[in-house]
Image (tube, coloured by chain):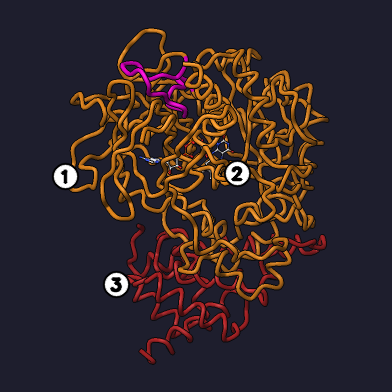
Amino acid sequence: MRQATRSLSDEADLIARYLIGKSPNDRVKRRYEDAMHTLHGDLDAVDRRLWKVVTCCPFTFRIIDSGLAVLRPASSIRRKVHVMLAVLEASPEYCEYFLPKAFGPLYAVNIVLTGARAVFVGIIGYAALKLMGIKGQ
Amino acid sequence: MIHDYIVVGSGPSGAQAAQTLVNDGARVAMLDVGVKDDLYRGMVPDADFTSIREQDPDQYRYLLGTAFEGISWGGVKVGAQLTPPRKFMMHGIDRWIPLESSTFSPMESLAYGGLGNGWGLGCFVFSGPELEKAGPDHGKMKTAYEVISRRIGIAAARDDAASYGLGGLDCFQEALKIDTNCHALYEAYRAKRGTLNQQGFFMGQPPMAILTQDQGERKQVAYKDMDFYSDQDMSAYRPWMTVDGLKKHSCFSYHENCLVVRFEEKEGHVEVSVNRTDTHGKEVLRCKRLLLASGVLGTARIVLRSFQEGKVRLPLICNHYCYVPCLHLRMLGKPVERLRTSLAQLVLFHDEERTHADVAVASLFSYRSLLLFRLIKEAPLNFSDGRKIMQYLQSSFIIAGIHHPDAASADKSIELREDLSTITHDKLHAHYALSEEEVKGTRQREHKYISALRTLKCFAIKRVYPGFGSSIHYGGTLPYSRQDKPFTLAPNGRLHGTKYVYVADGSGFGYLPAKGPTFSLMANAHIVAQNALSS
Ligand SMILES: Cc1cc2nc3c(=O)[nH]c(=O)nc-3n(C[C@H](O)[C@H](O)[C@H](O)COP(=O)(O)OP(=O)(O)OC[C@H]3O[C@@H](n4cnc5c(N)ncnc54)[C@H](O)[C@@H]3O)c2cc1C
């Protein structure tokens, strides 16, 4: 049980770093653990394989998530990320990453670049998953 | 003991029917399952959405749910749009009133206040031609709309859309404030009004069952943007407020945990059989007049059981619905105000012929209080970039919920079949399909909506079809008829084949205009109650 909790806490850390670029506080980690205990997001064989890659090489997270978004949008890996996203959004310490605000005109350029990157990584991710022999849902 | 009147159900129809009876001095018993929310009531702080988000460390409890039930995954399911504090409305459904269908997924409620606990407050007056097709008498409805408006309080504007939404209604309060996003859209509409009107499009503010001036204990809206989570200042009308008020009258009694199963007419009275949902016991209550207001599907179950005529199929109608998330380019990267409502800000009616006989409606919402994580999962992007992009786009989202009118056809029906595995030993089965012509007509209309919105610099991202039944507007199972046919209603709301049984919900509406039906259901319930009083 303690082992499982530790791994969920590590998981929370990994996913939050991927989503907002920093480790979450302990309260968010605990909440993520609670959520995952309650919602049971068991991984199937394909997801387990991909999750292993993500935990060993965190820099692949964006690529694999992008590929899954197109090929297997209901994947349990995406579900984990979705749960973390919800937990972060409903925490006052991280609400600034979600609430609407006034963005300067230069930020629009940033968003266009982010969009372009998302599409590019999407193509790479799709190709990578196909190369790994992963089929769509 | 024989009650004078028994009303079944505490939703908008039952609450208003009972109010009319009690106002006349009648002795009324209301039978209801009456599920209540004991978990979230009192949990949501009295503050605006942004302050809550910035300050409350426990916000996840009501935003995501104590069991994280607000984090839904997979396809669009019935009830997925409900926030955790509203989900109690659906408790007990599978157990007490099961329904099976591969083509139709309705939302039903056994809650105190029924589906009215979560309704979007849109109050629309049906036009003469619409009422003619639906059934209720136009002249009587005109008066009844005024009565209900006075009771519940409606905020509305006499704008371009008023002839569609408000009709000739005289009694209403000042309109709600529109948020920046929809205000900019409305200004764009005003600039292009001529062209859009020619195409049959009319935009304005929807009449809403919400107060902009205090009324009794209920306070005027404080624009906290928490409308989907709590009813703290009671500015939004919920039927339980009416029933709470009725409980103060000595001639009214409320009986919870009572699932009405069937009725039987005896000499001079009606016997109503009830399954207790608490003790699982059975009871029989007696009354001189029975008013069924248990929701269209709930009433159908009771009526079908009571007649036990073997295999009977009843017609079913339901507005088909699609929603279209759009980007309103003028608002990209712009700030939005703290104080607003989460409710529909505008409506766009489409009446190509301008006859008021075949009108579609799009309700236009801005997006904030339902949280971003729900939207991000819909985009085919990785979550990390998706979050950043959606946060930027958030202030420019307009969600257009398009409702189409519906009429009966052979392909839309319900049937009660024996099923010994259920508590009532039966199960409602529904079948719902549109004809090719209906599909073509609705798609064309949606296309026209999308072009009209594009004219206003509001660009559709995609069309989402949440499936038949998801509009939560039902009717037509026991249509009004002047002929004494089984499973129809006499013009006064009495169920043909009975002497003392009246139907006060939407079962009699043989046509469902695209506009939300609830205001008309309440007006009709008032008329049916008056008819029961004078019978
Ligand atoms: C999220 C949402 C948004 C909506 N938005 C709008 C809107 O903007 N405009 C609009 O016009 N409409 C809207 N609606 C629809 C509206 O809520 C319904 O039209 C309305 O509630 C129907 O009222 P009713 O009283 O006929 O039935 P219900 O509200 O379904 O009430 C039925 C009542 O009967 C009781 N009952 C059922 N069966 C039995 C039984 N066998 N024995 C005893 N009691 C029983 C239940 O406990 C309940 O109290 C919305 C609904 C939802 C859920």
From which residue to which does the magenta span run?
Answer: B492-511
User: Which quarter of the picture shows residue B510?
Assistant: top left
* x 56%, y 80%: residue: A28
B286 drawn magenta: no
Q: CA distance from mark 3 to mark 1?
A: 39 Å
In front of the other: A117 or B78: B78
B508 drawn magenta: yes
Q: Is residue B346 left or right of residue B359?
A: right
Q: Which mark is residue B402?
A: none
Inspect the image, locate mark 1, and give the three-letter code of the amino acid beneath it: Leu
Do discs 3 and 1 belong to a common subunit? Answer: no
The residue identified by callout 1 is: B420
Chain letter of the red region: A
Residue B455 on image: x %, y %: 72, 33
* x 51%, y 25%: residue: B529
- In the rendered view, tell whether residue B105 sits above or below residue B149: below
Residue B165 visible in the displayed image = yes
The residue identified by callout 3 is: A45
Chain letter of the orange region: B
